[in-house]
Amino acid sequence: MSLHILVAADVEPRHLEAIRATAPGLAVEHTADRARLLALAPTADVIVGWNVPPEVVRRAERLRWIHSTAAGVDQLLFPELLQREVLLTSSSGIHAEPLSEHVLGVLLMLSRRLHIAVRQQLARRWDRRTVLGDELGGKTLGILGLGAIGRAIAERARVFGMRVIGTRRSGAPVPHVEQVFPPDGLDEVLRRSDVLVVVLPLTPATRGLIGARELALLPPGAFLINVGRGAIVQEAALVDALRAGRLAGAALDVFEQEPLPPESPLWDLPQVIITPHVSGTTPRYYDRAIPLFCENLRRFLRGDPLLNVVDRERGY
């Protein structure tokens, strides 16, 4: 019996050909349509995609492995999957380039007040006082989550003369990072961070991690950048800190509810930069994601250990 692979992602024909070329006899189906996914699920041994619905997993009686084309897999840890012996792997590591560039881009905007300058441009207003920016050199950047993305951010931040500290589950040293703390060192990182970048996965331990108490520990005038998951930062507390002027600004790519509701007060805060969960997305996205899947597919067919196997207890 040939292996049936269901690709539930918006890939190009060349990506499908790369999957088929991995081994002879592969049956590869491709659809992003929910109804078609449900129809094809019963014959799928492997599903590749970002947001595989629970009802698809429920119908996929032959399913042996799901490979997520995203780094975070919190959206896949539903009972229909957790109750079965189905392998789950992620695309962790492929986002380091675009995400680190995004973080440095919005950090430069916040520091140089370019987001305020754009608002003034749209209003045809010339006001030099409101767009006088600061320098990054000598500032401390705190990174919560020193995985592949966090390490790439640290490397780029050092080019601007920033000091970098952060958290890592193991507490082990990281290149370009002056001091690495285990998770229980969060408060110390907060106290020292002129800029706080959140790159953590969403797990029971990180949900709501940054609230009013934590934001109050940041130095006055600090910036917050969240490219991890929206539910890690308590938005109501963040809005309060921004309105009170305790934080100078925030750049948010992820939110507690997505799309961000029109009535959210975040839209109206001039010191906030909002992007619609695109910090890891580029035209090259699947040029990185599909080769990783193909390497794992070769390992799967040989019976070798796979890359990026998700620990269901930890949630990543």
Image (cartoon, grey):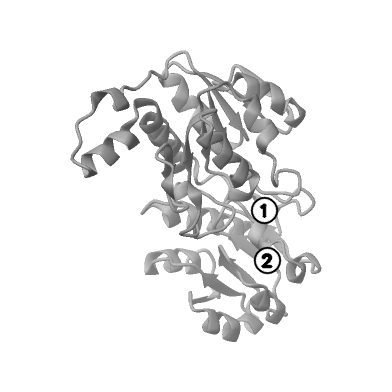
Q: Position of residue 186 (x, y in %)?
A: 70, 28
Residue at 56% from the left image edge and 74% from the top image edge: 6
Q: As displayed, is residue 186 above or below residue 148?
A: above
Q: Position of residue 34 (x, y in %)?
A: 53, 79
Say whether residue 293 is left or right of residue 190. Answer: left
Q: Position of residue 292 (x, y in %)?
A: 54, 53
Say whether residue 162 is left or right of residue 257. Answer: left
Q: Outermost residue, top direction? A: 138
Quarter-of-image position of residue 116 = top left
Check contact, mark 1 vs mark 2: CB within 8 A: yes
Q: Position of residue 288 (x, y in %)?
A: 46, 51
Q: Outermost residue, front direction? A: 244
Residue at 70% from the left image edge and 47% from the top image edge: 207
Residue at 45% from the left image edge and 68% from the top image edge: 16
Which of 24/39 is in front? 39
Residue 65 tag number: 2
Q: As displayed, is residue 198 above or below residue 305?
A: above
Residue assigned mark 1: 306
Of callouts 1 and 2, which one flags the residue occurring earlier in the amino acid sequence?
2
Q: Quadrant of the N terminus?
A: bottom right
Q: As displayed, is residue 168 above or below residue 27?
A: above
Can residue 199 be seen from the camera position used here? no
